[in-house]
Structure formats: C-alpha cells, structure tokens
C-alpha cells in the first residue's frame, strides 16, 4: 500500500527549479545497484525477530550511509541534513510528518557493523562487479598512484597525543601528517579496481612492488616518476607486465632539442595523457565528496571508509555511460 504524499512533498515536487543536489541524488539513485548491495549486507544485519525495538530497515540505513559519504558529512551532520534538506529526505525515504529521522547513534552503529565485517570492501567489490557486467572494467592495463590524506595533528584529545598509526611525510618542501590512499585504476575506463590505505611515510613504490595494486590480468602498468626502477625489481620481473613509468622532471627538462629528444618528449606526453585518468577518482573523493582529511582514528577505520568512497566514486565517474545505457534499454 502506497503512502499518501504530504503537503511538503507535494510542494517540493511542484517546484520549478531542480537544484544540483536534486540532480546528483537522482543520478546516484539511478546508477547504484541497490539490490546487490543489500544482499551483500543482509547476512550481517540484525533481524527483527528478537525482543526490543525492531531495527530500522536496511534500505533506509544504506541510503543514509550513501548520503553521508557522498556529501562528506559526520554522523551528526547527516542527521541534521535529514531535517534541513528535503532532497536528502526523499533520497533516504523519510517523511517527517509520519516519522522521525534515524539519529547519529543509529548511523554510528551501522557504520561500525560495516567496519567489523569488512562490508565496505564488499560494497566496493559489489559495485565493481556491477560495472564489470556493464563492460566498463576491461582489465588490460592499470594506472597506479597515491594521494596524501591529512589527519588532525592536534593533541587536544583524551589520550593527549596524535594518532599513532598516522605519520608525516615530505612532499616537495612541505611536510604532511596523515595517511596515503594507494589505488590501481583501469587504464581504459579510469575506474578504481584496488584500494590500499597506509601511513603517509610508506613509499608509493612499495605497494606497486609487491603487485598489491595490480589485479594480475593486465599486460601494461603506468606510474609517475615516484615508481622509477620498479621494473628492475625481482617481484616485477616475475609478473609479465610491461611498466611505463614517467621520466623524472629534472631529466625531462634536460632533453636535447634533437629528433631523439623530441621523440622522448612525445613519449612522455603520451604516458602523461594515459596517467591523467588516475586523477579523476582523487578529484571525486577529495573535491566532490569533500574527503580531504581523515574523520576517524586509526588506519583500519579510515581505510574502510576509503573502500566506500572509491566505490561510490566509480559510480559517479561511470554515471553518464550507465544512464545512457539504461535509457537505451528502457526505450
């Protein structure tokens, strides 16, 4: 039985302008494989067969969690957003005229459930499996890269010290305190297929050296100058992958103005044009999802969040193709 729409919902549906938030949530609604995600979480989600208050429906909590990640909100922030934004309420499926919105503590327990059972990685893998079925993950080449994510350096907390699992690293002439997100990206589609979280002082090449960022089916791998020398390491020689690593900037500036120098410059330009796709997921996570600083203490919780963020970033990056495919299928 369908519920009768309230006056606020009718007024909101009749508005003449569709905001960017409306369009974004409508696209996320259309491209997210909700059924597959719920089936991955259902075995671990509490049922309503016991005593006490029955748990809030999985569909609603999952949508609330997705809204939290896509807008970079805290637990309290997404609770406030449910009361402030009609667009987010419609996305989550809440009518304040009939019920109250789930509070921050309920979302906290749901997030801890995902962390305890490694379900954020399941969310990431489920989304990628859905995209692979659509033909978007070709797995012929991989681009590897890493980005720094800052952590709060303040010692004004209960322990009186900084997060011990975070470290500082120097990039250029500036020191950064926090962690690193290492990713492996499909060279054709630009979608992330592997995510690893480490402390900021872990070298980029160590993750690629252990083949941790490669899925094993690619024939070519691309990296920036930070991965120089990886093809000479014993671990890389055991895997039939051809590495295309960028030349160091200092050496590139000294290329001669000869035909050989022009050829090498064109080769470096071609490498850079392929590697540019690895920046797109970082752009979505940092600029669109506003994840520029770690929200939790410890690598485990923050790495778990990275799986969700990059999984939803894949949906954002593939949304135009997915929406076109759905439109063609419907017609």
Image (cartoon, helix red, strand yellow):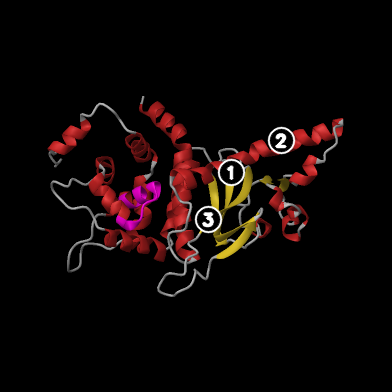
- Image disc number at residue 23: none
**Quadrant in which the C terminus is drawn:** top left
Around disc 3, counting alpha carbons within 10 Å, would you say few (fewer than 14), some (14 to 19), or many (20 or more)? some
Q: How far apart are marks 3 and 1 (CA)?
A: 16 Å
Q: Circle 3 sits on which residue? A: 149
* Residue 66: in magenta span: yes
State if disc 2 and disc 1 touch (CB < 8 Å). no
Residue 251: tell me if it is visible: yes
Query: Residue sitting at 39 percent across and 39 percent down?
Result: 31
Around disc 1, counting alpha carbons within 10 Å, would you say few (fewer than 14), some (14 to 19), or many (20 or more)? many
Q: Circle 2 sits on which residue? A: 269
Judge depth for marks 3 and 1 and give the one in front.
3
Is 163 placed above or below 252 here? below
What is the magenta segment's predominant secondary structure? helix
* Residue 135: in magenta span: no
Q: Earlier in the sequence, mark 2 or mark 3?
A: 3
**Quadrant in which the N terminus is drawn:** top left
Give the image location of residue 157, x and y in percent.
Answer: 41, 70
Judge depth for marks 2 and 3 and give the one in front.
3
Residue found at the far top of this picture? 331
Around disc 2, counting alpha carbons within 10 Å, would you say few (fewer than 14), some (14 to 19), or many (20 or more)? few
Is 164 placed above or below 188 here? below
Residue found at the far bottom of this picture? 159
Give the image location of residue 32, x and y in percent.
Answer: 38, 43
Query: Residue sitting at 13 percent across and 48 percent down?
Result: 98
The residue nearer to you, when weighing 9 against 158, is: 158
Q: Circle 1 sits on which residue? A: 278
Q: Give the range drawn in magenta.
A: 64-76
């Amino acid at each position: 039985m369908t519920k009768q729409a309230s006056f606020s919902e009718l007024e909101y549906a009749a508005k003449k302008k569709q905001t960017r938030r409306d369009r974004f949530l409508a696209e996320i609604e259309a491209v997210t494989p909700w059924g597959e995600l719920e089936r991955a979480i259902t075995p671990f989600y509490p049922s309503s067969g016991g005593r006490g208050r029955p748990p809030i429906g999985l569909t609603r909590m999952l949508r609330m969690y997705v809204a939290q990640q896509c807008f970079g909100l805290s637990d309290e922030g997404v609770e406030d957003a449910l009361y402030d934004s009609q667009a987010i309420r419609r996305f989550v499926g809440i009518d304040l005229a009939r019920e109250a919105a789930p509070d921050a503590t309920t979302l906290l327990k749901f997030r801890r459930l995902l962390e305890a059972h490694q379900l954020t990685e399941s969310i990431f893998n489920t989304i990628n499996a859905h995209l692979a079925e659509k033909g978007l993950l070709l797995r012929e080449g991989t681009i590897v890269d890493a980005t720094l994510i800052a952590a709060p350096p303040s010692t004004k907390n209960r322990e009186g010290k900084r997060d011990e699992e975070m470290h500082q690293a120097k990039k250029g002439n500036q020191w950064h305190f926090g962690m690193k997100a290492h990713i492996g990206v499909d060279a054709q589609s630009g979608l992330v297929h592997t995510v690893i979280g480490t402390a900021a002082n872990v070298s980029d090449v160590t993750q690629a050296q252990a083949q941790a960022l490669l899925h094993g089916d690619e024939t070519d791998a691309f990296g920036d100058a930070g991965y120089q020398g990886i093809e000479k390491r014993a671990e890389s020689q055991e895997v039939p992958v051809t590495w295309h690593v960028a030349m160091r900037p200092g050496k590139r500036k000294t290329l001669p103005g000869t035909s050989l120098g022009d050829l090498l410059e064109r080769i470096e330009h071609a490498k850079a044009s392929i590697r540019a796709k690895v920046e797109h997921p970082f752009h979505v996570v940092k600029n669109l999802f506003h994840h520029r600083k770690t929200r939790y203490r410890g690598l485990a919780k923050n790495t778990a969040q990275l799986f969700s963020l990059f999984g939803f970033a894949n949906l954002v990056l593939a949304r135009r193709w997915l929406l076109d495919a759905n439109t063609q299928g419907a017609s």
